[in-house]
Amino acid sequence: MSNSVCQEQVFQSLFHKHAESVINFLYYKSGNYNEAEDLMQDAFAKLWSNCAKVSLVKAKSFLYTVANNAFLNQIKHKQVVLKFEQLGHSQVSNVSPQYLMEEAEFKEKLERAIAALPEGQRTVFLMNRIDKMKYKEIAESLGLSVKAIEKRIQKALKELRKVSRKL
């Protein structure tokens, strides 16, 4: 029982290892960091309350499954739209207003292009590019084959290339 999820030290280790990637996974799906953080905490709470039923090797998969299900339940109650994502406050700088405006326009176009991707493509694309997760890790997290991940990334890149040619 030395590697039981019910042991506080093991659970804390799981939290430190997976919390950020679960938040990012949920953030990519919802576009709202605060909601993603809440859902991640709920997933870990559910893991803790079911720790006797979940083996250490299945803990990561359990977290992603619970987090995804919680996200899907939340969608039933309200529509999540990425374009209303909170924008960070601009910091004072010596950069020209023209440059700042062009940068903001480009960022907005890029965010819209990513948001326009189908959820499956957007999720795996961001997990790969932002979290630097390997295809195999993404496949394990989402319960898909590596081939499926490759195909989704390929389609996402194809769509983003189309948009970038228009910029």
Image (spheres, grey):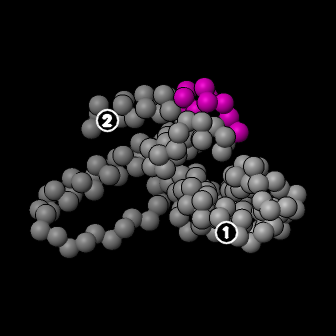
Question: Going from the N terminus, do you reach mark 2 or mark 1 first?
Answer: 1
Residue displayed at 63% across by 37% down: 139
Residue displayed at 61% across by 30% down: 146
Camera-near label (2 vs 1) is 1
> What percent of the width, then of the height, locates residue 123?
55, 44
Q: Is residue 28 visible?
A: yes
- In the image: residue 151, left or right of residue 63: left
Reply yes or no: does residue 151 show up in magenta: yes
* Residue underneath mark 1: 12
Q: Secondary structure at mark 2?
A: helix
> What percent of the width, then of the height, locates residue 140?
66, 40
- Which image quarter holds the N terminus? bottom right
Q: Nearer the viewer, residue 124 or 104?
A: 124
For badge 2, the amino acid type reads: Ser
For badge 1, the amino acid type reads: Gln
Which circle marks residue 164 in the picture? Answer: 2
Given contact means CB atoms under 8 Å apart, are the residues at marks 2 and 1 in contact? Answer: no
Tell me if residue 144 comes above or below residue 40 in the rendering.
above
**Marks 2 and 1, how far apart at CA:** 42 Å
Q: Secondary structure at mark 1?
A: helix
Q: Nearer the viewer, residue 17 or 44?
A: 17
Tell me if residue 75 comes above or below residue 8 in the rendering.
above
> What percent of the width, then of the height, locates residue 38?
64, 69
**Could you classify mark 1 by the number of other residues whose Cα lies within 10 Å: few (under 14), some (14-19), or many (20 or more)?**
some
Q: Quadrant of residue 99?
A: bottom left
- Which image quarter holds the C terminus? top left
Residue displayed at 20% across by 60% down: 100
Span of residues in magenta: 143-152
